[in-house]
Amino acid sequence: MGLNPFKDSNLNDLQKDITRLFSTWFGDLSATLKKNWVIFVRKGKERITVMFIPHSEKKIINFHISIFTISSVIGSIACIILVTSILIVNHTSTIKEISKLKMYGSNSKIQMARYREEIGKLYDIFQRFKPEISYLYSLTPESGNVNMWAKGGVHNPDPQQEIADESSPSMEVLNIEEMERDLKASREMLDKIKVFLEARKKIIENTPSLWPVDGYVISRFGERTSPYTFKKEYHEGIDIASFPGAEIRATAPGKVENIWWDPVTGLSVSVSHKYGFITVYSHCQRVSVDNNQKVSKGEVIAYVGRTGKSTRPVCFYQIKIGTDFVDPAPFLNKIAP
């Protein structure tokens, strides 16, 4: 019958067998170790004779030393050499690290000097930039006499100069803080300038500012001698000579106010604009727009002719503000060829 490990008698027999097996194995191992240890101790206690034989007739020196002693000396020397090597390597590494730190330190000083120099240049540029912003801001209606710039440090002429009081911030830090405050003030001023320019842009866009026709002025605004009566008269516009059929363009966006015929000015067209401007174009050959028609800036509204009392093909151009005619010359934004 086979062995049943779940019966108490068979379990006890199994435990005894295992115990006997380990006892035998460890016993043999212990005996072997003891035997080897005895051999090792016996060999280690064996003595070696060392003799020093001089070339002269002096006495020979000899002494006996055990293998254990020789092994201990050799081991100590090996340990000393190992520890010394480790210390030398660590010392060499430390020296290299110190050299690198010194190099980095010198580079950092160079970089700091450069940073100080660049901060100084930036500060000088910003100081030259401030009057330009101040001038633009003075053109706005909100400028008044308020000084929005920060009151701060001045540029340090010598970046290498050290501050005596270490607790005080450096001149570069003071300059950067001042520029930060001034940049914030500049942003506020630029926002107001932007609003001002946008409002002026709308005015300019709706102001008569183009030449109505390509040509050149042959008669200016103001008093002149009439080419018909040769008497003094007041000329309430300018005559721009051009070739027949040349395009006449609206000098500002607006609405055609009136188209009429006059024995003196011939075929004429008037356009009303924002801000009370009215422009009049006379001596036209023909008109290409209708009454109450909206026109854009630069749109063709008529063509040059010799209608009315005109000695040559011209465009008689007038600008009226309210009920008064004004000189159109300051409103022209380019010189005729």
Image (cartoon, grey):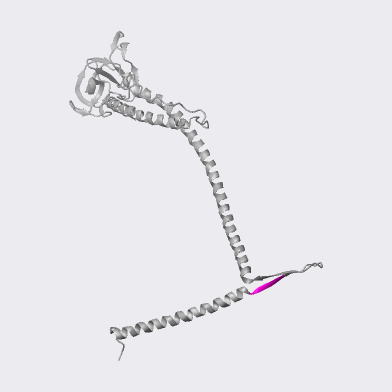
Q: Residue 87 or 184: which is nearer the viewer?
A: 87
Residue 282: % across, % down: 25, 20
Residue 172: % across, % down: 46, 32
Q: Residue 272 or 164: which is nearer the viewer?
A: 164
Q: Residue at x 35, y 28 (%)?
A: 185
Q: Is residue 125 magenta?
A: no
Please, is residue 135 above or below residue 7 in the view?
above
Residue 206: % across, % down: 26, 25
| Farthest residue, direction left | 292
Q: Residue 180 or 129: which is nearer the viewer?
A: 180
Q: Is residue 41 left or right of residue 181?
A: right
Residue 335 appears in the figure: no
Name which quarter of the figure residue 127 lies in: top left
Name which quarter of the figure residue 123 lies in: top left
Q: Is residue 159 left or right of residue 152?
A: right
**Predominant SS along the magenta part:** strand
Please, is residue 195 above or below residue 10 in the view?
above
| Farthest residue, direction top | 231
Q: Residue 28 or 282: which is nearer the viewer?
A: 28
- Which portion, as a residue range, is magenta? 46-50
Quadrant assignment for the N terminus: bottom left
Residue 90: % across, % down: 56, 54
| Farthest residue, direction right | 57
Total numbered labels: 0
Q: Residue at x 60, y 76 (%)?
A: 42
Please, is residue 104 above or below residue 53 in the view?
above
